[in-house]
Amino acid sequence: MSINSKFTIKDVLLNQESFVKKNKYSCQFCFEFIYKKSIYQCRSGHYACKECWEKSLENKKECMNCKSEVNSFKDLSRCLIIEQDFGKKQCYCIYSYFDYFIDGANKENENENKNENKILIKDEENGCKEIINIDQIDTHIENCKFKFVKCSHNGCDIVLRLNSLKEHENQCGFKLVKCEYCGCDDTIQMELKEHHDQCPKFPIVCPQSCSITTDRDLIKSHLENDCNNTIIPCKYYEYGCKVEMKRSELQNHLKNVNHQYFMGLLIEKLSSTLSTLSESNKTKDELVKKIDELEKKNDNLSSLVTKMDSTFLKQQDLYPPTFKNKWIISNLSKDVKKYSSQPFDFENQKFRVFFYTLDSIYATIIEIKTDGSLGFNYKYICTLVNNLDKSNSIKFKGPNSICKFFFINEIQDKKNGWLDTNNKITIKIFIKKLNNNIKNLPLESENICIN
């Protein structure tokens, strides 16, 4: 990581004093060296940096030195000879000095002597030895192998020269390293030992001194199952032999001690276990048999359900859905020529009933309408209820069409029973949806009672 450097061209010039005395390569008004500045001159040859000319011409249109007329920059010429001549002068590389003027270096001193001019000190042992032209300084600084850089490892703040960076980074404690045992690659070099102390694949010598080395995460299994120095009981321990010994001594113990009695107890237990297993197998066979029977019953039930579904569908065709309701119109008046019911839903269709009074011909029209197109045929029955004598109620059976009209050639009033005592008229509605596949299926009774 490259480090920015704080310096002026004056800090690195050879023979600084001679430059100051001659004053040839400084702007005649701001007195700064013309390093990286554009120099312009008037017709009389008086020159200054571009910034000073701009400030001056804002106030007066004249040369700052000879007062000759200068209306704009077009009246000035670029003084390339001075610029190029200054570019050929020699200077030191900024990296020939110690890192006092380097951002991030010597932070412990950055708050001390803030107002005190720091003096560049040559690093004769480790600094850059080259002397270069001023016009080459930027290219040289960019590629100088003595430049100051920071270590690239996260957490390391060391500033050092580029030519020693590689050696440092290989040894840097913040360098990420890969564990040779578990393959983990997110451990920094200074913590590698601590990682090895916990690494599950780090080789561990058996703590019981059996001369075996194994991975840390396998050591428990080794002690329990393989280590010759682990103390284990006799294999007939639960049958009475309570001797404990190292695993390596087990065979000699079995060879030198008579275990016939204990073996007999083991055989008895095995025989009992076999008997229990045999009984379990019989129980298992019975369960398998019962499961087969249940599966057959389930198949029969599935077949029955299928038949019932089919029967239900046929019944739906034979007995299609119907709609029954009544509409009561209050305060019937000759002045109102049209009454409309609230819309109602039936089989995903919206229906509405209309009642018209036509005084001129003493007639009434009842009409049923539906919104949208119908994919089925419908049959209708409308009944105008007589409140004095139900048998005199007028019933009209509509055809298979969307709209139905009913004509009644009698004036409605209370005397003839068409209006009740509260001046209300009642119309009963019956709608049946017909399946297109069924032809000439009769409606329900003509004397239908609609509640």
Image (cartoon, rainbow, N blue to C red):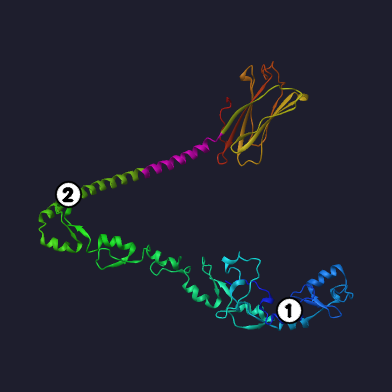
Q: Nearer the viewer, residue 334 or 238?
A: 238
Q: Position of residue 114 (x, y in %)?
A: 64, 65
Q: Secondary structure under badge 2? A: helix
Is residue 74 within the magenta segment? no
Q: Quadrant of the C terminus?
A: top right
Quarter of image, res 38: bottom right
Q: Secondary structure under badge 1? A: helix
Q: Position of residue 65 (x, y in %)?
A: 85, 75
C-beta proximity under 8 Å, tags 2 and 1? no
Instruction: Say how many tags the image has.
Output: 2
Tell me which residue sits at (84%, 77%) in the image.
76
Residue 314's disc number:
none
Q: Mark 1 highlights which residue?
A: 20
112 shown above or below 446? below
Q: Mark 2 highlights which residue?
A: 272
Mark 2 or 1: the one toward you: 1
Q: Nearer the viewer, residue 214 or 122?
A: 122
Q: Nearer the viewer, residue 256 or 349?
A: 256
Whole-number angstrom distance, CA of label 2 to CA of label 1 = 114 Å
Quarter of image, res 439: top right
Tell me which residue sits at (40%, 43%) in the image.
302
